[in-house]
Image: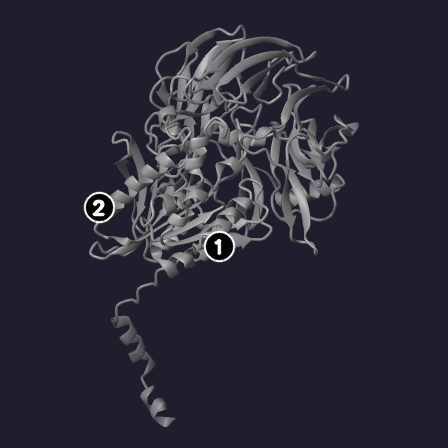
Amino acid sequence: MPHLTHRCRLPWLALLLLLASRPALAQQPRQLTMADAFLNRSLQPENLRQLTWIPGSKDEYSYLRTTGGQDEVVRGTTGGPLAAVFTLGELNQALQAAGSPTVKATGFPTLTWADVQTALVTRLSKVYRVNTATRQASVAFSYDPAAENVEMDPTHTRVAYTKAQNLYVSLAGRENEAVTTETNPGIVNGQAAHRSEFGITKGTFWSPTGNRLAFYRMDQTMVTDYPLVDLTETPAREKTFKYPMAGDTSHQVTVGVYDLNSRKTVFLQTGEPREQYLTNLSWSPDEKRIYLAVLNRGQNHLRFNEYDAVSGAFIKTLFEEKSSTDFVEPLHAARFVPGHPDQFLWRSQRDGYEHIYLYNTSGRLLRQLTKGAWQVTDVLGFANNDREVVFQSTAASPLQRRIYAVKLNGGNVRDLTPTAGTHTATLSPSGRQLLDVFSNATTPRLIQVTDVVKSAVRQTLLTAPNPLAGYPLGDTKLVTIKAADGTTDLYGRLITPPGFDPSKKYPTVVYLYGGPHVQLVTDSWLSGSNLWMQLMAQKGYVLFTIDSRGSGNRGSAFERATFRQLGTVEMQDQLKGVDYLKSLPYVDQNRLGVHGWSFGGFLTTTLMTRSPGTFKVGVGGGPVIDWRMYEIMYTERYMDSPQENPEGYKMANLLNYVDQLRGKLLLIHGTIDDVVVWQHSLNYLKTAVDKGIQLDYFVYPGHPHNVGGKDRVHLYQKITDYFDDKL
């Protein structure tokens, strides 16, 4: 092909001059992939791994960093230089010298500081004490490799754990000691009770010195077995678990106290009726008393009780909280004031917002420490020689979280982190400094040391770069609209596509949750959105989210507007969001989609059938369809029982609206979902078949309530493809 050869005879110098004279070719913008959205950690803001204060130190902190391609622990003080503690290689050598198997850890294990010179590391069910000065390790104790729910005591010398239905403790010289020897699998010890409602996250509670261990004993023998199908075997095998549905018999819980010295157990005399909720357990500083919130099954009467930890005897009720209009929801254990063993903090929404109250152990309210139309969202500890309480709240805005301090003897609240955005912090051992992790809509992550007394930043530990700098992102803005009641402000997030053209019409997807204790729109990185939403914007969608009434962190009136009528008020507010979208000239009103999971799946299906025609396409994941089939603790709080509120259950039951479906609806469910059981969406599918209604359906075999891991990429590709195809 001589003519091509002839045409290429251009001198190299001339070619270089020609290229140099042309404008530089623009770098192609990078597009997010589905794997990026869920698996690519490099697209998350940089962080300081295992950042923590070192107990017993003069406000030293430690964290992991990578040096020369290897992880190492470093420690430092405010303004001082960092000192290397040990590398992963040095830790592996120390553990192997102490008898650990020769298989080296490829990732840095979690460190727990026992004191200023001792770190604890767990490997293959052995707890090692590592001297950070000598870099030598020794075995402290070990426990059963099959252990679950492992919890170390405050002295870091023993652990409690569960195996099957029983509870064990393990410490040097007394390893794998059985606390309970229950043979009936329907009676479970040491695990979280009451379906992990009421702030319950665990089932064991060590006393301050680790000499006693309180634990839940949950009798589920009276609760109906519910079947799950294990598809990993052929033929498939049925596995049952206890699932107490609204209106049915609940399990019965007691609290045991095991004395590690006498090796005997007593049970708190919590009395009748047995169908009640025991939560928010705390120990007195001297370990002689246990304090417990006892809530009736109707969830409208709380008694805060004191018990003798030695005998289990009931001593007295310190105070009560009641509601004649909705419910009482205790979420946090009492917190004792250092140096004042007769005083404790209690958090309550009794005045309409979550606030801090100071009580004494006689049951007398000393004072309400915080007050206002805002929520306390966390209590960090005590400062100023234990004369102040440091806490996180929404005082500046429902969209923000800042750190504040207030004196125990009353007075004005001090703002320790005045920069607008979201601050999460930990208080130093002395109470004089904060490790403040901050972000806002445009700041990925900023980690600083803040002086509590002066409310001033003392040191910046990390300024994270924008991990999405190479990707074209749409514009994200926060909006405020009125709720369906005409007065309440609702906060929303609107994302428009990169290269946005206001003269075009864009398909729009509403992502929602709408249920209790969840807030999707915040003044944090990307305004609380995730990378799937940014990916959808890159594909040319507008994304919209609004926190309707019933969602979290807005106070009782906002959160309880949905009481006894789940789905109705939330739907009305979401439709106000739709009205806002329709007022935007670039939103294609004929191409609206809606998507949510769990409560959001319930609300998605609600909108597709109780407001038919509003949305062209809906995708609901793990949806509650009939609240009669959801768990007692959650459902009866917000709906009362089916016997007490039959009309409310009927109105919320989405099986009653299947024939009103307009548009395309895809339901998705995990086949071993033990939160919203598979039967919800299967019943919906069966009803659709019976009534001749077409809908789409997809299941994830072997997945529980949330589809995680690599399969989450498959899930959201499925969801995205559905919107692409139908919207």
Which element is circle 1 on? Answer: strand
Between residue 230 and residue 524, name the one nearer to us. Answer: 230
What's the colour scheme?
one colour
Give, as a three-letter code, the residue at label 2: Ser
Q: How many marks?
A: 2
Left or right of 448 in this view: 265: right
Q: Is residue 145 above or below residue 468?
A: above
Q: Is residue 355 above or below residue 579?
A: above
Between residue 656 and residue 381, name the one nearer to us. Answer: 656
Q: Is residue 727 above or below residue 601?
A: below
Q: Reading the chain from its start, which is encountered first: label 2 or label 1?
A: 2
Left or right of 363 in this view: 23: left
Which element is circle 2 on? Answer: loop
Query: Mark 2 or 1, which is nearer the eye?
Result: 1
Q: How far across and how far down the image is residue 13, in percent?
A: 31, 79
Q: How far across and how far down the image is residue 398, in percent?
A: 34, 30
Q: Residue at x 37, y 48 (%)?
A: 660
Residue position for label 1:
697
Q: Quadrant of the N terminus?
A: bottom left
Residue position for label 2:
583
Q: Based on the displayed image, in which of its 4 quarters is residue 309 positioned? A: top right
Residue furthest toward the front? Answer: 691
Q: Residue at x 38, y 56 (%)?
A: 723
Between residue 564 and residue 356, name the one nearer to us. Answer: 564
Give, as a three-letter code, the residue at label 1: Tyr
